[in-house]
Structure formats: structure tokens, C-alpha cells
Image (cartoon, grey):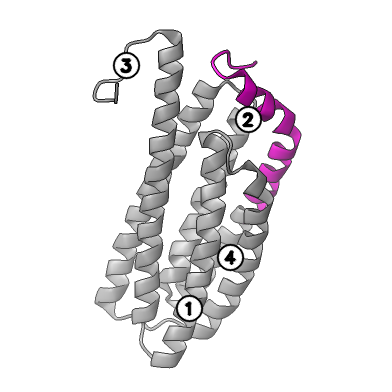
Amino acid sequence: MACSCCPASSAAQNDAAPHWRRALWIALIINAGFFAAEIVMGTMAGSAALEADALDFFGDAANYAISLSVAGMVLGWRSRAAMLKGVTMLVFACWVLGNTAWHAWAGTLPQAETMGVVGALALAANAGLAGMFWRFRDGDSNMRSVWICARNDAIGNLAVLLAALGVFGTGTGWPDVAVAAIMGALGLYGGWQIVCHAQRERQGVSHQRGEPAIPGSAA
């Protein structure tokens, strides 16, 4: 069903639907698999950065499942899904920061070799996903949120590799803690971007329908 308030963007969405769904299914499978692998390896290696990356994979897998459920729906529903994804990213980012603080307090020394191997594999996977979603980066808030997730994941994997080098070179866990904290902050920023974009779309849909403006929103 096309959205009456933005026919051009809806037409583009419909034209991209087969490619969009296929890309989402691929991303869902890859993210679910890497979540299972990284949460096990991150716990065994005592790495806050790997655990942060694992939870990020889990959040993205859930987000891709949400995107699949609303693909082809009107803009209002897609913006609601994007809002849910943004809030999910914010929650996971807060968990990452809390877990990172615990590792810093406990003085955990992670296994640099495990971090490096798992981080390199995750980087290869996320770089491929980011390239696959590049064509959708200028779409609606739902498409943009997926692109942001893939982009943040690739950056996070690079950071994990840097943390592994830092742990190996210094013999301390502080590089791992620092990178995990950066990943948490990046998750907060990405989630806030998605929430703001989705809120603007919802306001636009309400305006087109003649509904009252959302309290506190810009005129």
C-alpha cells in the first residue's frame, strides 16, 4: 500500500523491496551467527570489547527482523519500527557502558589473540554488510537505521582489533575497556540519530493527515 504523503519515496521503496528483503535476510543470519560466536568467545577471553560487539550483533539481528516485518508498509509504520530500533540501540549502549565499568573495576586482562581473530572475522562480515546496505543509506528512517547499524558495526570491529593490539602491547586490559566505552558511546549516538530521524518522519505523517502537532515539536 503506497503512502499518500510521499509517493515518490514509496515507489522507490516498492522498487527496492526484493533487494531490500534479501539483504535483510542475509544480514539477519550473519548477525545472529556472530552474536552466538562472540558472546561465547568474548566471555571466555574476558574481553569487554568483544562482549560489547556481541550484544551489538544481537541488537542488529533483532532490528533486521523488525525491518523485515514492516518492509512494504506505509511510512508511518516504518518510522515506528525505526523508533523502536533506535530505542533498542540506546538500551544496548547503556548495557555496554555498564559492563565496561565492571571490567574496569575488576581489572580483567583479556586474551589479545582471541580478540584479534574474532574481531578480524567480524570486520570482514560487517564490511560486506555495510557495502550491501550502501545503496539504501538515503532511504527512509527504517532503511537509514539499518545502514547506520552496519556502519557502526564495521567501525566497532576495527576498534576491537585496535584494542587487541593495545592489550598485546601493554599487557593490561585498559585498551579493551577504552574501546568498549567508545563503542557504547557510538551506540548512544547512532540510536539518538535514528530516534530523531524517525520522530521527524512521524511528525511529517501527522501533519499530512491534519493531526495535531506533537507537543514540544518544532513548528
How far is the residue under mark 4 from the one under mark 2?
28 Å
The residue furthest front is 219
Q: Kindly identify the residue that appears in the image at 56 percent across and 44 percent down.
A: 146
The answer to if 17 sits in the magenta stretch is yes
Between marks 1 and 4, how big is the CA–CA gap?
20 Å
Q: Which residue is mark 2?
A: 71
Helix, strand or loop at disc 2?
loop
- Sequence-first disc among 1 and 2: 2
Q: Which mark is residue 162?
A: 1
Depicted 195 relative to depicted 73: above or below: below
Q: Which quadrant of the figure has residue 67? A: top right
Q: Is residue 55 inside the magenta stretch?
A: no
Disc number lying in front (3 or 1): 3
**Label 3 sits on residue:** 213
Residue 101 in the image: x percent, y percent? 27, 68
Report the Cα–Cα distance between label 1 and label 2. Answer: 36 Å
Q: Earlier in the sequence, mark 4 or mark 2?
A: 4
Q: CA distance from mark 2 to mark 3?
A: 26 Å
Q: Find the distance from the CA under tag 4 to the CA under tag 3.
A: 46 Å
Q: In the rendered view of the protein, which quadrant contains the N terminus?
A: top right
Q: Secondary structure at mark 1?
A: helix
Q: Is residue 39 visible?
A: no
x then y, percent, for residue 217: 29, 25
First-in-chain label (4 vs 3): 4
Residue type for callout 1: Leu
Q: Which residues are magenta?
A: 1-30
**Residue 37: assigned label:** 4
Task: Name the kind of residue labelled 2 in the image.
Answer: Ala
Label 3 to label 1: alpha-carbon separation: 46 Å
Q: Quadrant of residue 201?
A: top left
Q: Amino acid at mark 4?
A: Ala
